[in-house]
Image (spheres, rainbow, N blue to C red):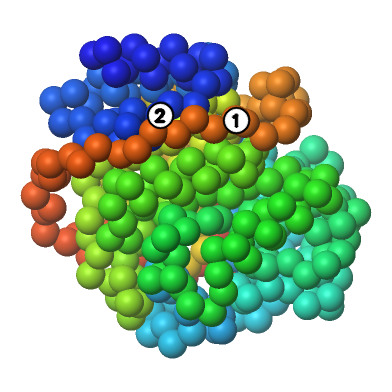
Amino acid sequence: MDLLNTLVEKGLRRELPTREEALAVLATTDDELLDVVAAAGKVRRQWFGRRVKLNYLVNLKSGLCPEDCSYCSQRLGSKAGILKYTWLKPDEASKAAAAGVAGGAKRVCLVASGRGPTDKDVDRVSKTIEAIKDQNEDVEVCACLGLLSDGQAERLRAAGADAYNHNLNTSEATYGDITTTHTYADRVETVQQAQAAGMSACSGLIAGMGETDADLVDVVFALRELDPDSVPVNFLIPFEGTPLAKEWNLTPQRALRILAMVRFVCPDVEVRLAGGREVHLRTMQPLALHLVNSIFLGDYLTSEGQAGQADLEMIADAGFEVEGTDTTTLPEHRGGGGCASACGEPAADEDTSPEIPAARTDLVSVRRRGAGTDLAPNA
């Protein structure tokens, strides 16, 4: 396909595709899927070889969030039967993190529900970061605490935080349909605060919330302009008890096309396969390793993931290798600034989406182990 040859050439040059080209990737057929994966895989290998970075989530505070994000099981008014607990003590969080590090994780992601941290919360997380780094000197620590106030990013950086995560989630045009208690601009500002404080920015999206192809391209192009170092791609987990519980819009093939589009638009960025991979990719997960260079190990914030050992076996069986702490994830040139944009207007594509199969609600398992419980974590 001329389209794929063009996209490979642009990816190897770090050149932004046009909007038409990005939309065309999402519009490819299932018969073309392996060609799409192979093409995006060339770009992935150019910048990251066959390395896979492992990340491990520690949910510091679960549930009871005052925000109304429709996709979230921890949202205001959620009736999802998830774990609910207040802040873990630093030693508890450090113990949870150690399980992930022992499983091969290079980065620990500390997440807390809520609109954003108070100054007392920042102090608490700072002590947690110090406790983790005392036990694991080489591990990267990423904080994800919501919207930041003035000076908080600098304090987290001084405490040893290497990165800060705050996802854009969906396009600016549709953001108000998903969340009303804060704005898309609030999220952009927090990512920029983290960058200004010297932390590596991590910002991504959630696919499968009923968005259009144009929405997906919009948010990925916005991420390219924002220029985070890592882009997590989440696939909606439709928890019962949340407003999006009925949104089963993804097939494994659709998920792979989305990952390929992200790789073409963000060729030299750490693209992370995040929440929902087991639910939506299922047995097609190994193919996704040809598109992404980073995954989460074990469980997520409120749902259980694939067994950590199964993740390691999948990586090895697919011919990839776990990235060690002695390896720098990003290419050397990623130390620079943002990327230039080139935009085209989307074509009006005929809807050729495959019929969505019946919902597999049995694939969503609420986390009952690890942080906040007396049971061992899945790592």
Viewer-proximal residue among 339 and 315: 339
Q: Quadrant of the N terminus?
A: top left
What is the crowding at mark 1: few (fewer than 14 residues within 10 Å), some, or many (at least 20)? few
Quick check: 236 above or below 53?
A: below
Which of the labelled discs sits on residue 185, or is there none?
none
Query: Could you tell me the amino acid type at mark 1?
Result: Ala
Quick check: 321 above or below 159?
A: above
**At 41% from the left edge and 15% from the top edge, which residue is drawn?**
8
User: Which residue is under mark 1?
Assistant: 340
Query: Could you tell me the amino acid type at mark 2?
Result: Thr
**At 16% from the left edge and 31% from the top edge, which residue is drawn?**
29
Label count reads: 2
**At 42% from the left edge and 47% from the top edge, which residue is drawn?**
218
User: Which residue is under mark 2?
Assistant: 18
Q: Position of residue 167 (x, y in %)?
A: 55, 56
Residues under numbered marks 1 and 2 in contact, where contact means CB atoms less than 8 Å apart: no
Q: Position of residue 370 (x, y in %)?
A: 56, 64
**At 54% from the left edge and 44% from the top edge, which residue is drawn?**
223
Residue placed farthest to the right in the image?
158
Residue placed farthest to the left in the image?
355
C-alpha span from label 1 to label 2: 12 Å
Viewer-proximal residue among 80 and 8: 8
Left/right of residue 341 with respect to residue 246 in the rendered view: right
Viewer-proximal residue among 341 and 287: 341
Q: Position of residue 201 (x, y in %)?
A: 68, 46
Residue placed farthest to the front in the image?
345
Q: Secondary structure at mark 1?
A: loop
Left/right of residue 230 with respect to residue 172 in the rendered view: right
Q: Secondary structure at mark 2?
A: loop
Left/right of residue 266 with respect to residue 229 in the rendered view: left
Quick check: 222 above or below 173?
A: above
